[in-house]
Image (cartoon, helix red, strand yellow):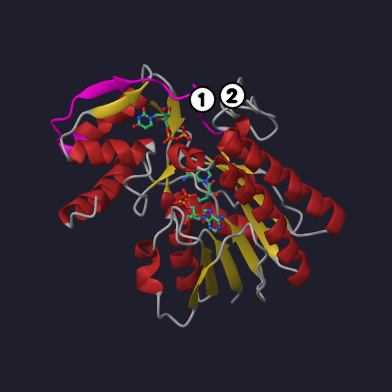
């Protein structure tokens, strides 16, 4: 069993990872500055002998004796990462440097939660790892996109220069319970609006596409990636290739919730990618045949149930 550090462990993905790694008998340190994460996501683990919660900002060095690091710290929703763009890029870049420094010092294996945003507004479809992307370096999404691209560079340089055992995964839009209902991402926005019978906000013409992966499939891919041999470093796409327009997603959510919501159209935010769909051939090859198992209707139903419970408790 391993001693594992999860940065951003109180966030949406991090909290599911804490659950999974503790259920397998590991000791987990959950490090978070609670910028977008919440103690509610990991409250059930507080008091567990295998779990430690540390309030810390990854832009400052941190030291602990650990065997593995999952580096997830970084706001992921566009409104949140644009809220303090300088802190976002510092989190990606200085967080990577600090966590790689720690990995070097204690000889830990380290996995970077990178993103499909490294492909920007992609000119090829679906996106394969060999594609270098189409990213605006000076736009409102750049603090996140370029921060994550630079983090990948730093990971590769620590690997080449210092033989650090690294793993890079590029996560495509992922959803599920523990998403922050107010963080502005499309799945949480649409579900909360539908459950409240409020108009569903479609940005632009709603014809842009995304491919949505349920959280359980991502956690399976992440843990399998960490368990691969030292010769496997990625980057590897993880996502569900089933692709939808935002209008299709909205209508599906209206249908699954039985909502009376209508659609309203709002301006498209700057640099919003027009299409996104992962090519997951490489992940399937290196992760023992991993593939997404949860279809959108099943994943949305579980997520709707989660948000419905929050609404009943008046938390939203
Ligand atoms: P999230 O916002 O729920 O979680 C991020 C966590 O990092 C939060 O708990 C936040 O408080 C913490 N954090 C932020 N800045 C920090 C700092 N400076 N120091 C310490 N902690 C800090 O988002 P998420 O969806 O769980 O995303 C987790 C990771 O996965 C992020 O790195 C994100 O870029 C990546 N990712 C997520 C998606 C997705 O669809 N959810 C897609 C691609 C990549
Ligand atoms: N979007 C939308 N309505 C919303 C929130 C988002 O139409 O209330 C759109 C957004 O413009 C984008 C897509 O949904 O085209 C996915 O947005 P999200 O913020 O979830 O993720 P990202 O753009 O980073 O993939």
Q: Residues within 10 Å of mark 1 (few under 14, many from 20)?
A: some
Q: Residues within 10 Å of mark 2 (few under 14, many from 20)?
A: many
Q: Is residue 260 magenta?
A: yes
Q: Is residue 104 left or right of residue 118?
A: right
Query: Quarter-wise, where is residue 200 in the image?
Result: top left
Secondary structure of the residue carrying numbered label 2: loop
Secondary structure of the residue carrying numbered label 1: loop
Q: What residue sits 63% from the left and 25% below the top?
A: 136
Q: Main secondary structure of the magenta part?
A: loop
For the magenta stretch, what is the residue range? 255-278
Query: Quarter-wise, where is residue 206 in the image?
Result: top left
Q: What residue sits 60% from the left and 74% below the top?
A: 3
**Residue 194 % position (x, y):** 21, 36
**Is 158 rendered above or below residue 66?**
above
Question: Is residue 180 among what the camera can see?
Answer: yes
Circle 1 sits on which residue?
273
Q: Is residue 106 left or right of residue 227?
A: right
Do callouts 2 and 1 mark residues in contact (Cβ within 8 Å)?
A: yes
Outermost right residue = 161
**Residue 217 % position (x, y):** 46, 50
Counting residues from the start of the chain, the first of labels 2 and 1 encountered is 2
Circle 2 sits on which residue?
122
């Amino acid at each position: 069993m391993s001693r594992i550090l999860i940065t951003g462990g109180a966030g949406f993905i991090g909290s599911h990872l804490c659950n999974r790694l503790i259920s397998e008998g590991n000791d987990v340190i959950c490090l978070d500055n609670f910028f977008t994460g919440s103690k509610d996501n990991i409250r059930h683990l507080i008091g567990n002998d295998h779990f430690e919660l540390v309030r810390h900002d990854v832009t400052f060095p941190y030291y602990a004796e650990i065997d593995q690091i999952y580096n997830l710290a970084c706001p992921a929703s566009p409104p949140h990462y644009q809220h303090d763009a300088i802190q976002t890029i510092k989190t990606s870049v200085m967080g990577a440097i600090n966590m790689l420094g720690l990995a070097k010092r204690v000889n830990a294996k380290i996995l970077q939660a990178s993103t499909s945003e490294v492909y920007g507004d992609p000119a090829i479809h679906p996106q394969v790892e060999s594609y270098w992307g189409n990213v605006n370096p000076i736009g409102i999404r750049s603090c996140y996109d370029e921060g994550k691209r630079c983090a990948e560079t730093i990971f590769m340089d620590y690997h080449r220069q210092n033989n650090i055992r690294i793993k890079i995964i590029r996560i495509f839009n992922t959803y599920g319970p523990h998403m922050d209902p107010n963080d502005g991402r499309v799945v949480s926005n649409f579900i909360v609006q539908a459950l409240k019978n409020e108009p569903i906000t479609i940005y632009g013409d709603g014809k842009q596409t995304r491919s949505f992966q349920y959280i359980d499939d991502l956690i399976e891919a992440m843990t399998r990636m960490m368990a691969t041999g030292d010769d496997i470093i990625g980057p590897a796409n993880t996502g569900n290739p089933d692709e939808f327009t935002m209008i299709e997603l909205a209508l599906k959510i209206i249908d699954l919730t039985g909502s009376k919501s209508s659609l309203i159209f709002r301006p498209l935010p700057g640099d919003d990618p027009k299409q996104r769909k992962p090519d997951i051939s490489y992940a399937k090859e290196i992760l023992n045949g991993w593939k997404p198992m949860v279809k959108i209707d099943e994943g949305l139903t579980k997520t709707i149930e989660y948000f419905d419970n929050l609404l009943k408790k008046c938390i939203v």
